[in-house]
C-alpha cells in the first residue's frame, strides 16, 4: 500500500469552498476537533458580519486558523499549554519560520544537565525508545535556546506533532511502548525524522492575514471579552472516564512546558500530571458554567458548538443563551466521531449543533 503523505492527510472531503490556507493546516489528532465540520462552520461564520473573533476553547487550533484565513483578527485561547503552542505557531505568528541554520542548531543540541534529561529519566520504559526520549530532551534543550518566541513556538509545535504521531493511537493512556506496532509510517519514523518533517510542515503553515492575532493560555473566564464574535467549543460532560484531555494528552501538556510547574504523579503507570479543574466537565457545575460563559461574552455574537449526546440538552442551552442574546438560532448536522471503542461507535454518531446568539 502506498504510504499516505502529509499532503494527502491535509485534505478532507468537502474542503472546496474553504479558504485555500486550510490545505496547509497541520491536522492535529485531538479529541473533539472540529476539523471535519470546518466547511459547515465556515459557511455559517461567513454569513455573519464581524471583524474580530475569539476562539475561547481552541484545542487543535483549526477553527482559529480558519478565522485567521477568513481575514478576521483572532484571539485563540485554551486552558491547556500545548493547544496554545499550536496557535502561537500558526495563528499569532504571521511571518516567522525556522530557517536551515535554526534547524541545524536544534538538531545538533544536546541536553546540558541532569535537569535537561527529565524526559528520559521519567518516561523510560513507558513511552518511545530510550534513544527517542533522549532526542526529545536534546531537541528541547536546543529549542529553549532559540531567541525568537515565534521560532520557539514553530519548533515546539513541530515537536508536539512529532510526539503524537509517533505515539500508537495518538494517546498517552497505555504504558507499553511495544503495543500497537501496526507498521504505519508514523510509527516507523523515529522522533528525529518526524521532527525534521514537521518543521517543514509548520513552516509551510505560517501565513499573514495582515492583522495582529494572538494566542493565550487562560481559563476562559480570564479571557478579555469584547470581540465582535466568540466561538465556543467547550468540553462535554464525559459519558465515560476516557473523555479527559489530560488523561489522553498529559505527555504533550508536559512536553509543551518541559513539565515546569507540573506535578508528575509518579505513582501512576504512565506518569500522568494532575488534571486541572474545569466546570464544563461535571454535571453539577456545567449549567452554572454555561450561564457564566454566556454572561461573560454577552456583548459578542455567540457561536456555540454542541452535540446531541452532551449535557445539558439543547433546549436548556438555548434558554440560557437567550438570557443574554436577543435572538438564538440553531443549526444542525449529523456527524460521526472517530474516537472511542467499537462498542461506543453507535453513540459516536451524533447531531452537531451550532447555536448562534446575536
Ligand atoms: C472540544 S475541545 C475544542 C476543540 C477545538 N474547537 C478544535 O476544533 O480542535 C475543548 C477544549 O476546551 C479546553 N478547556 C476546557 N476547559 C476550559 C476552560 N475552563 N477554559 C478554557 N479552555 C478550556 C480544553 O483544554 C479543550 O482543548
Image (spheres, helix red, strand yellow):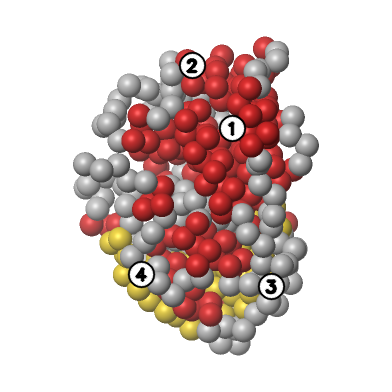
Query: How far apart, in angstroms, are the residues tagged by discs 1 and 2?
Result: 17 Å
Q: Is mark 3 within 8 Å of ligand 1?
A: no
**Residue 56 x/y as whole percent:** 62, 61
**Residue 75 x/y as whole percent:** 68, 62
Give the foreground label among 3 and 2.
Answer: 2
Q: Which quarter of the rendering shows the C terminus?
A: bottom right
Tell me whether the residue at label 1 lies in contact with that at label 2, contact meaning CB atoms closer than 8 angstroms.
Answer: no
Mark 2 = which residue? 131
Query: How far apart, in angstroms, are the residues tagged by discs 1 and 3?
Result: 31 Å
On residue 255, which mark appears?
Answer: 1
**Res 285 seen here:** no
**Foreground residue among 3 and 235:** 3
Mark 3 = which residue? 52
Figure check: 69 above or below 95: below
Which mark sits nearer the N-terminus, 1 or 3?
A: 3
**Element class at badge 1:** helix
Which mark sits nearer the N-terminus, 4 or 1?
A: 4
Query: How far apart, in angstroms, are the residues tagged by discs 4 and 1?
Result: 34 Å
Query: How far apart, in angstroms, are the residues tagged by discs 4 and 3?
Result: 26 Å
- Residue occupying the point 63% across, 29% down: 104
Counting other residues with Cα less than 10 Å from the Cα at mark 3, is it few (<14), some (14-19), or many (20 or more)? many
What is the count of numbered marks? 4
Query: How far apart, in angstroms, are the residues tagged by discs 4 and 2?
Result: 41 Å
**Element class at badge 4:** loop
Mark 4 = which residue? 14
Q: Is mark 4 within 8 Å of ligand 1?
A: no
- Residue occupying the point 39% across, 42% down: 242
Amino acid at each position: 500500500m502506498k504510504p499516505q503523505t502529509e499532503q494527502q492527510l491535509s485534505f478532507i472531503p468537502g474542503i472546496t469552498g474553504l479558504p485555500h490556507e486550510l490545505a496547509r493546516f497541520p491536522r492535529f489528532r485531538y479529541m473533539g476537533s472540529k476539523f471535519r465540520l470546518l466547511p459547515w462552520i465556515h459557511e455559517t461564520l461567513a454569513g455573519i458580519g464581524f471583524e474580530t473573533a475569539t476562539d475561547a476553547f481552541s484545542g487543535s487550533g483549526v477553527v482559529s486558523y480558519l478565522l485567521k484565513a477568513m481575514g478576521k483578527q483572532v484571539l485563540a485561547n485554551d486552558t491547556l499549554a500545548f493547544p496554545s503552542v499550536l496557535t502561537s505557531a500558526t495563528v499569532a505568528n504571521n511571518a516567522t519560520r525556522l530557517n536551515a541554520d535554526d534547524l541545524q542548531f536544534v538538531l545538533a543540541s544536546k541536553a546540558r544537565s541532569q535537569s535537561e534529561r527529565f524526559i528520559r529519566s521519567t518516561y523510560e520504559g513507558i513511552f518511545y525508545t530510550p534513544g527517542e526520549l533522549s532526542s526529545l530532551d536534546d531537541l528541547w534543550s536546543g529549542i529553549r535556546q532559540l531567541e525568537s518566541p515565534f521560532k520557539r513556538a514553530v519548533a515546539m509545535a513541530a515537536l508536539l506533532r512529532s510526539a503524537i504521531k509517533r505515539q500508537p493511537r495518538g494517546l498517552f493512556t497505555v504504558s507499553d511502548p511495544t503495543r500497537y506496532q501496526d507498521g504505519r509510517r508514523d510509527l516507523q519514523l523515529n522522533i528525529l525524522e518526524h521532527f525534521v518533517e514537521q518543521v517543514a510542515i509548520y513552516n509551510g503553515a505560517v501565513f499573514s492575514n495582515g492583522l495582529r492575532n494572538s494566542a493565550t493560555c487562560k481559563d476562559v473566564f480570564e479571557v478579555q471579552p469584547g470581540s465582535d464574535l466568540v466561538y465556543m467549543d467547550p468540553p462535554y460532560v464525559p459519558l465515560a472516564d476516557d473523555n479527559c484531555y489530560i488523561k489522553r494528552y498529559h505527555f504533550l501538556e508536559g512536553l509543551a512546558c518541559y513539565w515546569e510547574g507540573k506535578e508528575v504523579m509518579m505513582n501512576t503507570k504512565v506518569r500522568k500530571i494532575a488534571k486541572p479543574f474545569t466546570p464544563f466537565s461535571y454535571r453539577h457545575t456545567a449549567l452554572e458554567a454555561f450561564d457564566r460563559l454566556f454572561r461573560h461574552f454577552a456583548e459578542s455574537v455567540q457561536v456555540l458548538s454542541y452535540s446531541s449526546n452532551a449535557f445539558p440538552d439543547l433546549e436548556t442551552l438555548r434558554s440560557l443563551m437567550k438570557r443574554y442574546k436577543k435572538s438564538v438560532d440553531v443549526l444542525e448536522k449529523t456527524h460521526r466521531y472517530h474516537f472511542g471503542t467499537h462498542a461506543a461507535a453507535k453513540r459516536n454518531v451524533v447531531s452537531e449543533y451550532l447555536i448562534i446568539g446575536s
